[in-house]
Amino acid sequence: MSARAASAEVRYGPLVAALAALALVAALASLMVGYARLDVPAALADAFAGRSTAAAVVLEQIRLPRAALGAMVGFSLGLAGAALQGLLRNPLADPGVIGVSGGAAFGAVVVFYSGLAGAFALAMPLGGVAGAVVAALLLYALVGRGAGTMTLILAGVTVNSFAGALTALALNLSPNPYAAYEIMFWLMGSLADRSLPQLWLALPLTVVGWALLLASAPALDALTLGEDTAASLGFDLGRLRAQLVAGAALAVGAAVAVTGAIGFVGLVAPHLLRPLVGNRPGRLLLVSGLGGAIVLLVADVAVRLIPVHPELKLGVATALIGAPLLYSLIDRMRREA
Amino acid sequence: MRAIAACIGVALLASPALAKPQRVVSLNLCADELALRLADPGVVKSVTWLSQDPRSANMAAKAAALPANDGHVEEALAYDPDLVLVGPFADPASIALLKEVGAPVAEVGAPQTLDGVRRQIRDLAAALGAAQRGEALIADMDARLARVAVDPSRPRLKAVVLRPNGFTVGPGSLVDEILARAGLDNLAQRLDIAADEQVPLEVVALLSADILILDRDEASAPSLADAALDHPAIAALARRMTIVSLPARLWTCGGPEVAEAVERLAVAAARAREATQ
Amino acid sequence: MRIAARGLVVRYGERAALAGIDCDLVSGELTGLIGPNGAGKTTLLRVLAGLQRTDAGETRYDGRSAAELGRAALARRVAYLAQSGLSHWPLSVDHVVALGRLPHRRPFSPPSAADRAAVEAALAAAEVAELRARPIGTLSGGERARALLARALAVEADMLLADEPVAALDPLHQLRAMALLRAAARKGAGVVAVLHDLTLATRFCDRLIVLAEGRVVADGPPSALTDAVLAEVYGVTALRGERDGEPFVVPWRAAAPNLRN
């Protein structure tokens, strides 16, 4: 904690505006990048005029959902990461690291491969949410009262291992011969060839999750001084926990159901942006969401530019950046302790 | 090439072949199907479980009446067979074991050309002592192929094949020849790929094919691989190109069912020509 | 404001942290809550702040229960300063002090002029104004304690319940902080402070409540802290005296066994 930390703070309004603008740029970049040469302006013109040329179809049905989902999922992961860190009072909490994404993946896998999703489309994101809730509750039971970093990481490893094993088991039990090989998608995530219907399906639950999380900002600020002080400042801690768990489960669960589990976005974004909001957990929420959107969109552009077949899974790209960061964070915390 | 060798061969090993085997066990899906078509009733004692699934097999109804095996040599021996049919990638150790106990083995391959298909039917028919039935099967297939009329003067329509997980079919395979027989050009050649590879959906959409061939069947259990073929972009493309569903079972084994594949494609080609007029 | 507590009982398993407490606290008074370790001082303070459930008894704020008053109103009118003094994130001092205004602020609206004024007043009163931009983790123990006290003052509550507010301070700042608490009481707030230093307690407090083993042993002006009480509760004898009209009490020796119960 250096004296420099406080001085990095910038004004909130301009910060949010700048991040939003960057996110927009990243989304546009995502639209422009792909595997086929696409004349984007022409495709846009076709789409607006209602001409369903091949270019318009590619733009509307393939690239647009990919960019929109990249922004939506990135925002959810960044926001949920910041919220979980505020709740657990620990900068290492990230939906992937602590197992919430893994639980969501298991929930989504059960719903999809059992055929439930075919009967009732909304079952898919709901399955992800249910899995996320169970994982979050399990985790909170172990580390809820501000247990130390070691316990948090161990709990996350446990929940993740268990969820991953159950996911693999469910996939192997599926009668479809392809299922067993699809584990890489669920555990590492991808935005490739996602569709507009998937975006619309995940969006309502996600937005509700965002609202719950963003509304908790003042309470998270109060929690900086500990549970007793926060309660004395008028915040209902039981309700706050429920709100944060529900919000994170909704946002992360719906996202994972569509894209698989993508980790470390909720670690990288809050970490980079925290100094810019004076370390205040409340203000970090929105800023971290925007940062997460930027990180994920940039990673998604990168995996399409890297000439590897098949396409690199997004979770691999985020882990390549995020895991070394996690390592250095743990190392720093260990040395400061 | 091993493939060609497989196409050519029926290898008879060890003991002298009986004139007409009475107890045949098949340990391979493609062998199952041919054997069920060619052998006398009651001669085939067991087939693999795969051939009983209508999604992936052509003779599912007939196969369902027989006991299923998992493709293991030990299971075959339980029937005291006088002919065991194996696939092209059978384990040499298993074949050696069969040789030791004196059970004749015939290998069924994966032909890459129509001529190869005919040769395989003949060879297996001979091994089963059903040469006449073999010829009839070939004749029937050839007749169906002949009925598919392709006007050589008209430009060939362009087609691209899309399989689960976004895989396509490379040049030089049996599917290629089936496409050609139906009067279609496999656009995979333009993509500069040597064998079966994954093609991004964007690329498929922008290829300006006339016909999109989907290896899709009415699903049993769901998977992401199959769901990839349900992408809305494909439905949107349906307005611009003809889409035909062609399940893999019609062309992976290289049996007489390839004629049906050619027929379906020819019908689709005719539809596509009408649509552009 | 008047906080009236009757028959408070709090049990942790077999042990009773509070074994039946009655007390009344009013605005305008600085009350010192003293007693040996484990006497129940922190528990009592937390009950009065509405943070701790009781197994028996009730607490009323101007005649109303905490539930009737409502969480938000209680937060505005009763401020609590925890003993532990932690801050999970390295906020700067002015941001920490500004947290004290949360009970008064509408969520997501910017701080009002009244909020800003309260923060400035609190920073000045606790003498941490020149530290305002420093991250709280870089402060010394005493500076941090003053910053957190400023946070509690910023609430501008009717009642301030402070758990060992001066324990970490050096002598100069201890005197100033006690003077500050007394001034706050004179201005109309009620202040209850858990204290270990007997001289500070007798010099500055209008009233002392002495706890031992979960019960009130003495409750009254500082003169209520008699030798008998000292021996019974602390097991010590003390030197007493007076200077400029203000008393001092210095623990001197362990009490002989027959002077204790």
Image: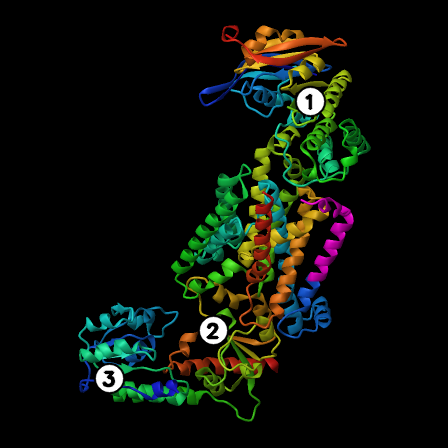
Kindly tell me whether residue A166 is visible in this rendering.
yes
Image vertical order of residue C197 relative to residue B215, above or below: above
The x, y position of residue B114, in whole percent, is 40, 88
Mark 1 lies on a secondary structure that is: strand
- Residue at the (48%, 51%) spot, across then down: A160
Quick check: B112 left or right of C80? left
Mark 1 residue type: Leu
Q: Which mark is residue C160?
A: 1
Image vertical order of residue C50 relative to residue C6, above or below: below
**Magenta stretch prevailing secondary structure:** helix
Find the magenta span and give its range. Answer: A1-26
Mark 3 lies on a secondary structure that is: loop
Mark 2 lies on a secondary structure that is: loop
Mark 3 vs mark 1, foreground winner is: 1
Q: Which mark is residue C129?
A: none
Q: Which mark is residue B128?
A: 3
Q: Same chain for labels 2 and 3? Say yes or no.
A: yes
- Towards the viewer: C220 or A293: C220
